[in-house]
Structure formats: structure tokens, C-alpha cells
Image: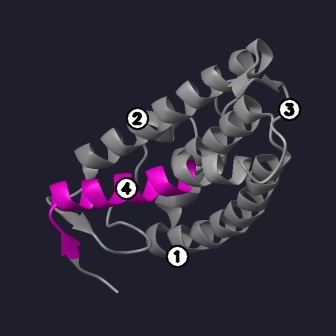
Amino acid sequence: MRGTIPPLPALTLMTAAHTSAFAVLPIAVSSLGERHGWSRDRPGSANLAAGVPVLITGVGIYAWTVATHLKQAQPGWQIALTPDYLARSGPYRLSRNPMYLAQLTLWAGWAALFGSLPVAGGLAAWTAFVTGLVRWEERSLHKRWGATYDAYRRRVPRWAALPGRGTR
């Protein structure tokens, strides 16, 4: 399926979908079990210290990734599994999958903030799903971009460069 949605409605739709999947859903899932480290319906200092910086990092990665796509995309947002451009700037210099990395980081932040085993289970399930999806996407990108993608893939790690080690 291919088509184009104007930028503002596309950004609004994507923000609503991602907010639902990576904020509303983990918050709802956290109510399915005990919230460890909480007292009087409030997170403890360890939960805050572990969860808040991770959540802020996830939001930052997500915003940087969306901004990068807004700069590179043609006017309007294409409805397709892979865009008509190969993102290699911004966070894509450090990770081939910064959007998925942001999503996983957000789930990890919620799991830490809520001290929630059900949210940790959601993180594990999303990690397993995304890992398979990334492998499929990599094959699709290789078919579409060939040697250009292969060179990018050799230079940039799937998830993230380790601090002090740079890219491969």
C-alpha cells in the first residue's frame, strides 16, 4: 500500500499512535500487578532515579529521530513500510534503528518507574517482536538500496554504538 498523508495530519496520527503504544499502554499494563518500590501510590526515590532519566532519554531519541525524518522526507508522509530515502544522518549515524531503540527505552523507563513485572514482560515481548521485525527490514533495505545500505550497515551498529567505541 502506498499513498501520501500531508505532514501535519501524519505527524498528529503518528504521535497519537506512539503515545498510546509507548505511554498509555505501559501505564495501563502497570496496573495489572504490584508496583514494587512504591509507597502510598507514589514511586520511591529508586524508581524515580532509575525510571525518569531512562524515560527522558527515550523521548529525546524519539524526538531526534522524528526530526531527522521530517528533514529528509518528501513533502507529505508516505504510507509504506520503507520510505523512499535511506536515513543515515542524525541518530541514524549511531544506530540503524533509533526509533525502535527509543520505543524499547521508553518501555524500560516505565518498567523501572513503576517497578512493574507486567511492564517488564511487555518490554520483553516488544523486544522479541522488534528483533524479528528489524531482521526483516534489513533484508528489505538491502533489496531496495543494495551496496549503499550494505556500506551503511557495516559502518553503523544495529542498536547503538557503545560509549567510547564509536561505530564499527
Q: Nearer the viewer, mark 4 or mark 2?
A: 4
Name the quadrant containing residue 84: bottom left
Dominant secondary structure, magenta: helix
Please, what is the three-letter code of the amino acid marked with disc 2? Trp
100, 27: nearer the viewer: 27
Which residue is denoted by mark 2 in the rendering?
64
Please, what is the three-letter code of the amino acid marked with disc 4? Ala
Within the magenta stretch, is there residue 14?
yes
Q: Which mark is residue 143?
A: 1
Q: Nearer the viewer, mark 3 or mark 2?
A: 3
Label 1: few (<14), some (14–19) or many (≥20) C-alpha neighbours in 10 Å: few
Pointer 4 or 2: first along the chain: 4
Distance, label 4 to label 2, CA atoms, is: 17 Å
Please, what is the three-letter code of the amino acid marked with disc 1? Lys
Label 4: few (<14), some (14–19) or many (≥20) C-alpha neighbours in 10 Å: few
Residue depicted at x 54% and y 25%: 56
Pointer 4 or 1: first along the chain: 4
